[in-house]
Image (cartoon, rainbow, N blue to C red):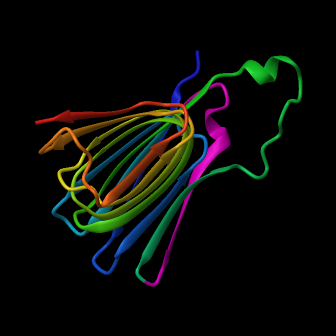
């Protein structure tokens, strides 16, 4: 059996205005907001290649960047069986309320709730659940189903543009 690898990190976000996330291999992403001026991340990898992926962060001015990357010195076995190895990467983030959030992901399950100044979310496949009272910005997907909770009506607000080419957009009003 293969265990799991966990990383926990925190950053002071008292001067941060925007958060930029790039998670191309994450299978599950949870983002919540809180009243503190701290960014908290819990990253967990499971499976036979659990040590293949890591997190890298940087702060440039008022912008915080967090990305998932593949270990550069990884020795890929290159055999036919290695193509079927299972890896599950899960990230849970808690960020300060009222920030701009940019997220890029491939095939994942997203759960995003809280208070954001603006959203820019791009994902390819999977599903996403948003529980945001007054969403602003844009959400784009190739085939993910997008679910919205916590809205006052059955219509998306005019200040958010939502597009999924092959998925469904479902609004669950209060």
The quadrant the C terminus occupies is top left
Q: Residue at (28%, 65%) from the top-left corner?
A: 38
Residues shaded magenta: 46-61
Residue at image location 56% in from the left, 57% down from the top: 67
Q: Nearer the viewer, residue 40 or 98?
A: 98
Membership of 50 in magenta stretch: yes
Residue 141 percent location from the top left of the image: 52, 43
Q: Position of residue 154 (x, y in %)?
A: 19, 38
Identity of the residue drawn at 83% across and 40% down: 75
Q: Is residue 171 above or below residue 56?
A: above
Q: Quadrant of the N terminus?
A: top right
Residue 159 in view (yes/no): yes
Residue 145 higher or lower than 79, as above or below: below
- The x, y position of residue 66, in whole percent, is 50, 61
* Observer able to see residue 7: no
- At horizontal 44% and vertical 76% (from top left) the residue drawn is 63
Position of residue 123 measured from the top left corner of the image (x, y, whole percent) = 53, 44
């Amino acid at each position: 059996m293969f265990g799991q690898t966990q990383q926990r990190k925190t950053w002071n976000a008292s001067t941060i205005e925007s958060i930029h996330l790039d998670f191309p291999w994450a299978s599950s992403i949870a983002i919540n907001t809180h009243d503190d001026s701290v960014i908290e991340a819990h990253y967990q990898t499971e499976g036979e290649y659990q040590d293949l992926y890591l997190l890298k962060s940087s702060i440039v001015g008022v912008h915080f960047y967090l990305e998932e990357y593949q270990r550069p010195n990884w020795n890929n076995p290159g055999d036919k069986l290695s193509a079927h190895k299972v890896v599950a990467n899960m990230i849970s983030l808690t960020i300060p309320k009222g920030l701009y959030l940019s997220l890029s992901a491939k095939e994942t399950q997203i759960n995003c709730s809280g208070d954001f100044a603006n959203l820019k979310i791009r994902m390819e496949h999977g599903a996403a659940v948003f529980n945001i009272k007054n969403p602003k910005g844009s959400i784009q997907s190739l085939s993910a189903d997008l679910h919205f909770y916590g809205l006052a009506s059955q219509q998306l607000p005019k200040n958010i543009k939502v597009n999924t080419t092959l998925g469904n957009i479902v609004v669950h009003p209060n």
